[in-house]
Amino acid sequence: MGKYRLFAFDLDGTMLQPGGILSQAAANALEKAAEQGVEIVPATGRMKNFIPKSLTQLPFIRYAITSNGAGVYDLRTGESLFSCLIPNALAVRVLQMLEEYPVYVEFYTAGDAVTQQENPRIAVEKYGFPPEKQMFLKKNYRLVDSLSAFLTESGICPEKINLPYLRPEIRRELWQRLEAMGGLKLTSSVADNLEINAEGCDKGAGLRGLCQSLGVDRSETAAIGDNGNDLAMLEYAGFSIAMGNATEEAKKIASAVTASCQEDGAAQAICDYILT
């Protein structure tokens, strides 16, 4: 076995090509790392049941950090190994506030996604979803009449509340109002979305929770990412890699910088830093 026992990787903008595609080079590199005894762990803002089958069907991928660290799962058994949920009353307040705006809202719970009945149908017409965002509407949703009413009645504590596409002026206003509310962790995986978790919840906390469950020291971990919701994971990992297309903040945190996503930089990074 090499220096690292666990390798955590972001999906969109990192391991996956545009359109959510896992390249053959990336799949081969991941397989070689697994053959060396490295635990291969997707770490994503997506909920568990929206991780592409190109990854979940790989026999060596057992664990996943999902919803920005709010849900860490054993994919073989479905067991939750770590969770960091938004308190129900706070989540209801958030959703009631969001009802004031013409925005697409969804929340994740136990690996699934919930949104309002009409949302997928009117995403383009009312919310302005551009073509490259429309793949994120293809979730196996539970559809409800009102998100806030459903949460109030069910008592569910969401893993994450997600606003996948926002116009800049609305995004700025919502960020300010949500930040003032307190008790929340706000981040983005791309420049035009807004992701809401419980305070203290991030991919770094999820990685720490998984490491504790598996008995892996942080010095034995490596991680790769590209954007705001990857920063805490890059900070926690013993060795961190930023993509060539990463934000400047991610590059400053990282131990190394690889090529861009479009150049299969994640596959290159595995060969350069993980394989021995």
Image: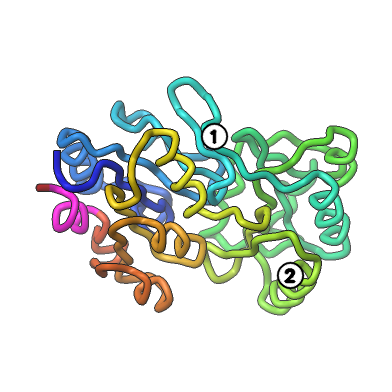
Label 1 element class: helix
Q: At 81% from the left edge and 44% from the top edge, which residue is drawn?
A: 88
Residue 32 placement (x, y as % from top left) = 16, 39
Residue 237's spot in the image, x, y percent?
A: 35, 56
Which mark is drawn over residue 168? none
Q: Where is 200 relative to 151, above or below?
A: below
Q: Position of residue 276 (x, y in %)?
A: 9, 47
Crowdedness near tag 1: few (<14), some (14–19) or many (≥20) residues, C-alpha within 10 Å: some
In the picture of the structure, the residue carrying the numbered disc 1 is 49
Q: Which of 143 and 2 is in front in this view?
A: 2
| Element under disc 2 | helix
In the depicted view, which residue is nearer to us: 195 or 201? 201
Drawn side of residue 24 relative to residue 192, left or right: left
Q: Which residue lies furthest to the left in this view?
A: 276
Provide the major secondary structure of the magenta segment.
helix
Does the segment drawn in magenta span residue 96? no
From mark 2 to mark 1, how far is it between C-alphas? 28 Å
| Residue at image point 34% right, 57% down | 224
Q: Which residue is drawn at 36% across and 76% down?
A: 252
Can residue 215 be spotted in the picture?
Answer: yes
Identify the residue shown where x is 43% and y is 76%.
249
Where is residue 120? Give x, y as percent: 70, 47
Residue type pointed to by label 1: Asn
- Region in magenta: 267-275
- Going by the numbered disc 2, the residue's amino acid type is Glu
Q: What colour scheme was applied to this rendering of the protein? A: rainbow
Left or right, 225 with respect to 101, comes to left
Q: Name the residue under label 2.
A: 179
